[in-house]
Amino acid sequence: MLDELLKTKELATLPATTFKILELLNDEKRLNIRELAELIEVDATLTAQVIKVSNSALFASQVQNRSIMQSIVTLGLNRITNIVIGVSIFSQALLKSTDSHMHDMLDKYCWHTSSTAMVSKSLAKRLFLNLREFEFIGGLLHDIGKLTMLQYDVDLYKKVIELIENENLKDVEAEKEIYGVNHNEVGAGIAKMWNLPKEPSDVIKYHSFINQAPENTKQLTAVVTVANYLCEIWGAGFYGGYNQINFANIPEWQILTNISNNGNTALDIEQITFELEIDFKNSVEFLNILREVNK
């Protein structure tokens, strides 16, 4: 089943330019402004989309960017890379469907992942973590396995949803029962196929199994997972099976507490969720921008 899922035709529609940019991300020494600009400019549609997003109110740029080079200088390499990946993942070519129910599910998926990306970025900032914006990419891609399962057979995934809603199973449990694999395993296969950097690959593979995450990416995975939970309980979930969460009892929150004040003081859950919920609302704007550039 895993092999069949990884053959899903929509996965091949990710622009070749994006694959090359992802390769560059694996080699920081090679990633430079000129090479990144030249890569993006090869694709005229992608160029126009990236410039449009970089000029949006979301990024509050003081300068009207008119070229890829100018956009990179204004926003930085990592942020432009995030825009490229976001535009590619949510492009019409990847997500188009003539089935109205499928369209609604894809829209729900996009809202969840873009929300998780925005909240992950905000959470990392509040914890003073320099995660090289992999928290944003990790948020965008953490459920890429679910997208593949949907595109492979939407009726099968409806059975997963029924188990989650009627049997109170978690997503990974219901997926295993219906598909024989869970979305983390499928996502890990996609990450390998796309040659993603280790950091977002580990987020994709371990965000449902934080205790199995390697130590050097455990903080990053915890940030994205907590953001994922928050988006679930704020109404921007994607069938995770998490209706309510006692943050004090989950290992991800303990990891973040240990980061904050070297573990001497627990994070104030009420204060931080209040602050993050404000940023969460901006995720709607981010998703609307992605929809707009793909019209």
Image (cartoon, rainbow, N blue to C red):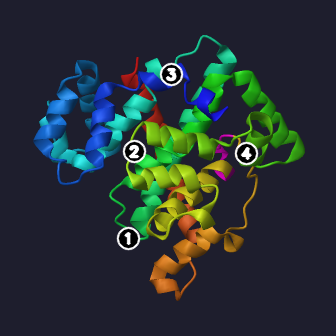
Q: Which of marks 3 and 2 is nearer the N terminus?
A: 3
Label 1, on which residue? 128
Q: Find residue 234 and report its horizontal and vertical position in percent.
A: 65, 50
Q: Earlier in the sequence, mark 1 or mark 3?
A: 3
Q: In this view, does 270 lie above or below 258?
A: above
Q: Dots 3 and 4: beta carbons under 8 Å?
A: no
Distance (Cα) linking label 3 and label 4: 22 Å
Q: Residue 196 carries which label?
A: 2
Q: Say whether residue 269 is left or right of residue 275.
A: right
Distance (Cα) linking label 2 and label 4: 24 Å
Q: In which quarter of the image is residue 158?
A: top right
Residue ID at (28%, 35%): 20
Magenta region: 233-238
Q: Say whether residue 153 is left or right of residue 63.
A: right
Label 4, on which residue? 171
Name the front one of labels 1 and 2.
2
Q: Which amino acid does label 3 sit on?
A: Glu
